[in-house]
Image: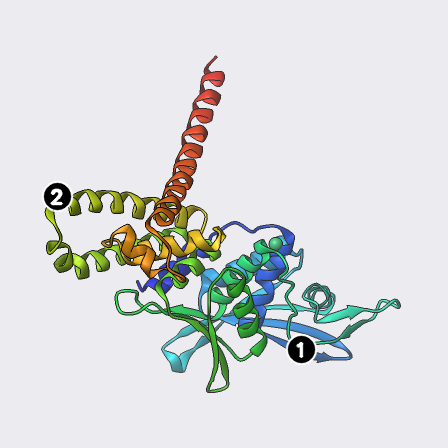
């Protein structure tokens, strides 16, 4: 299974979140896979088409459990395409009106009539939680990731330009830089740096994929640095390698459980540099920073990252203890 499919497999079963996030995710999935239909006599419909049946079930849940609509789900077989199946979800009439108002495509007038204002959702992405849900929806609906062994690249491609723009804005909030271009009638938003890919996966909630990616990056880095390390002064480099290992582990832990993008910029920078250059000394790491900083500042920032990792571990211990407490009190 491709890395891209593994990420989708991790994201699809995740529980539905708050109502605001349900709407954000539905907006993205509608921009990516939905179409607006006119049934005559002012009646509207919204239809989603996708090949991934598990994803269709998630859209069904978003609409039904999340928004309280009654979507219809059916399958279309394509005999000419070797029996490939498309899952089709539809909401019509009043349900379609409710959805269009919720996605800010339509407004309900004082007389109860629903008036269409836009042909595409206007997602409301003011909150961090909703931006994450939106990114997840966009990726599930029209995203793909290259095999990270070859290159670090994630893209979402949709006919709706609004999706590319909203994805770009949501990513920028998380400190991830992305680019938008047009390809055969589709608007493509993409990113292509290892850390940006890891941060985006973390924002979407794909923590297993982040871990897989980080491990791969470290292996790659270690391999390419093997020669360089062997040229170092033996005794000194051994100590250095041990503390660099400890720092990298701490940073990975923070990245997986909090996301590096949640950190202040100075800490983010050092964390990224350390992940990219596990072999260099603190002085060299400081030289790579923008603007360069001294050894003491680098040392201080790495200690703060280790302390954060320590806090995360301590919170696990506490949760574990509380679990035992509860178990003990149940026994008693
Ligand atoms: Zn939200």
**Does 109 sit left or right of 332 as displayed?**
right
Is 164 positioned to the left or the right of 96 in the image?
left
Mark 2 or mark 1: whose residue is earlier in sequence: 1
Badge number at residue 204:
none
Tell me the quadrant of the picture where the N terminus can be found: bottom left
Q: Secondary structure at mark 2?
A: helix
Q: What element does badge 1 sit on?
A: loop
Q: Nearer the viewer, residue 95 or 72?
A: 95
Give the residue furthest to the right: 111
Q: Quadrant of residue 112?
A: bottom right
- Residue 121 appears left or right of 307: right
**Residue 119: image tag:** 1
Q: Is residue 7 above or below residue 145?
A: above
In what quadrant does ligand 1 lie? Answer: bottom right
Q: Which mark is residue 235?
A: 2
Kindly identify the residue that appears in the image at 18 percent across and 59 percent down.
225
Q: Say if residue 213 shows up in the picture.
A: no
Q: Position of residue 240 (x, y in %)?
A: 21, 46
Q: Residue at x 50, y 86 (%)?
A: 185
């Amino acid at each position: 299974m491709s890395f891209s499919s593994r990420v989708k497999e991790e994201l699809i079963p995740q529980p539905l979140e708050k109502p605001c996030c349900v709407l954000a995710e539905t907006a993205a999935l509608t921009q990516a896979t939905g179409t607006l239909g006119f049934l005559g006599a002012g009646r509207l419909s919204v239809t989603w088409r996708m090949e991934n049946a598990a994803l269709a079930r998630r859209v069904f849940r978003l609409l039904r459990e999340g928004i309280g609509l009654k979507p219809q789900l059916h399958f279309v077989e394509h005999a000419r395409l070797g029996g490939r199946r498309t899952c089709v979800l539809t909401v019509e009439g009043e349900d379609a009106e409710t959805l269009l108002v919720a996605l800010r495509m339509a407004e309900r007038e004082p007389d109860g009539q629903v008036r269409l204002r836009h042909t595409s959702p206007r997602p409301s992405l003011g909150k961090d939680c909703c931006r994450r849900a939106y990114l997840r929806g966009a990726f599930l609906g029209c995203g793909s990731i290259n095999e990270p062994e070859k290159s670090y690249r994630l893209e979402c491609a949709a006919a709706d330009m609004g999706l590319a723009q909203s994805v770009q804005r949501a990513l920028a909030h998380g400190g991830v830089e992305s680019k938008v271009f047009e390809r055969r009638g589709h608007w493509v938003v993409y990113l292509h740096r290892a850390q940006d890919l890891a941060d985006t996966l973390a924002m979407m909630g794909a923590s297993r994929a982040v871990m897989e990616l980080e491990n791969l990056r470290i292996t790659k880095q270690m391999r390419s640095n093997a020669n360089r390390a062997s040229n170092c002064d033996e005794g000194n480099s051994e100590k250095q390698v041990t503390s660099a290992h400890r720092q990298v582990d701490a940073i990975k832990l923070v990245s997986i459980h909090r996301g590096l993008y949640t950190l202040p910029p100075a800490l983010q920078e050092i964390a990224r540099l350390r992940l990219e250059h596990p072999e260099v000394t603190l002085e060299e790491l400081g030289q790579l920073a923008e603007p360069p900083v001294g050894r003491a500042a680098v040392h201080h920032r790495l200690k703060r990252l280790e302390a954060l990792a320590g806090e995360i571990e301590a919170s696990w211990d506490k949760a574990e203890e509380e679990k035992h407490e509860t178990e003990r009190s149940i026994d008693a």
